[in-house]
Amino acid sequence: MMSAFNDMEIFARVVTAGSLSAAGRELGLSPAVVSKRLKRLEDRLGTRLLQRTTRQIALTEAGRDFNERVIQILASIDEAEGFASGRSDVARGTLKVSAPTTFGRLHIAPYLGPFLGAHPGLTVNLVLSDDFVDLVREGIDVSIRIAELTDSSLVARRLAPNHRLLCATPAYLATHGEPRTIADLSRHTLLATAGQDPWRLEGPSGPVTVHVEGRLRTNSNEVVREAVFAGLGIAFRSTWDVGPELRSGQLAHVLPAYRASRRVAVHAVYPSRRFLAAKVRLFIDYLGSLYGEHPAWDQGLEGIVGSG
């Protein structure tokens, strides 16, 4: 029975990873062993689950139906383990965390050492991406999202406020002039990724939408970050991202009466389950203790984050 369960787990990992070799790397098994276990599962079921080539795999119709049921079984087992482990303060196994690239680099990676030191039985798999991540499909235990959350299928905990504002270098503003109204932005170079268009601002008269047009196009938030530091235009950035540059004067606050909605915040989200595994609860508690309603990245910016 345990052997059959392990084969199902391998099958689900192959589907998620997209190839036998990728699944093998995650499981610490050779592609040959993975292939052998899949064949054993198919022989036991008497049907083919996957069409396999040297480059890719594809689910058969039977495989799609079987995969849906396997995911439910694994989720139920994970929930049962979460119930048991959630009653303790011992974190074990692998914790898969997703986060936006820049936030993860600046505000998660530097603080993993103490957390891992406190939980020697835990491994953290930190996945950084600015794309939307499907938690269930990607097997994510907890995701950091900076947004106004609307997905009721997820459970969320607010970790910190997110103060997002318009900024540019003094040199850029000296050359191109400082905008005095929202309409003035149309005469400036605006820096954003495709996913950040349009900008949705809140001002003295309510919400305002600004469509971003510029000569720099990129899918990278980090490229936009470097571009505004280089004086290429005006960007819409969070204080957790550009706080040091705002404090030092390397960046200037533009149109201070306008900013992102205060409903946007830094959240930890996880799939809606009745029981929360100790590893997830302890990690979220740890980040909450690091950030809070007055995070370190906003220190020295009270005049900025408290205005508007």
Image (cartoon, rainbow, N blue to C red):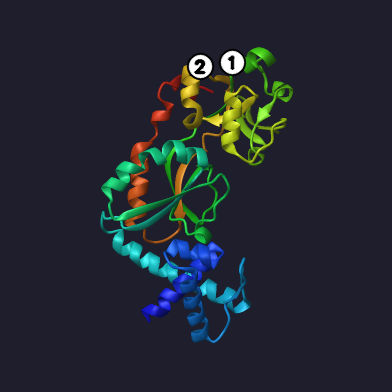
Give the camera-side residue of 17 and 167. 17
Residue 133 appears in the rendering: yes
Which residue position holds label 1?
Answer: 170
Task: Tell me: 279 left or right of 141.
Answer: left
Q: Position of residue 212 (x, y in %)?
A: 69, 33
Q: Secondary structure at mark 2?
A: loop
Residue at position x 55%, y 49% from top? Answer: 150
Three-letter amino acid code of the residue under disc 1: Pro
User: Which picture quadrant has residue 293?
Assistant: top left
Residue tagged by mark 2?
249
Q: Is residue 203 visible?
A: no
Displayed quadrant of residue 285: top left
Q: Earlier in the sequence, mark 1 or mark 2?
A: 1
- Tell me the quadrant of the picture where the N terminus can be found: bottom left
Q: Nearer the viewer, residue 116 or 247?
A: 116
Amino acid carrying mark 2 in the image? Gly
| 147 vs 31: above or below | above
SS of the residue at dot 1?
helix
User: Residue 253's spot in the image, x, y percent?
Assistant: 56, 20
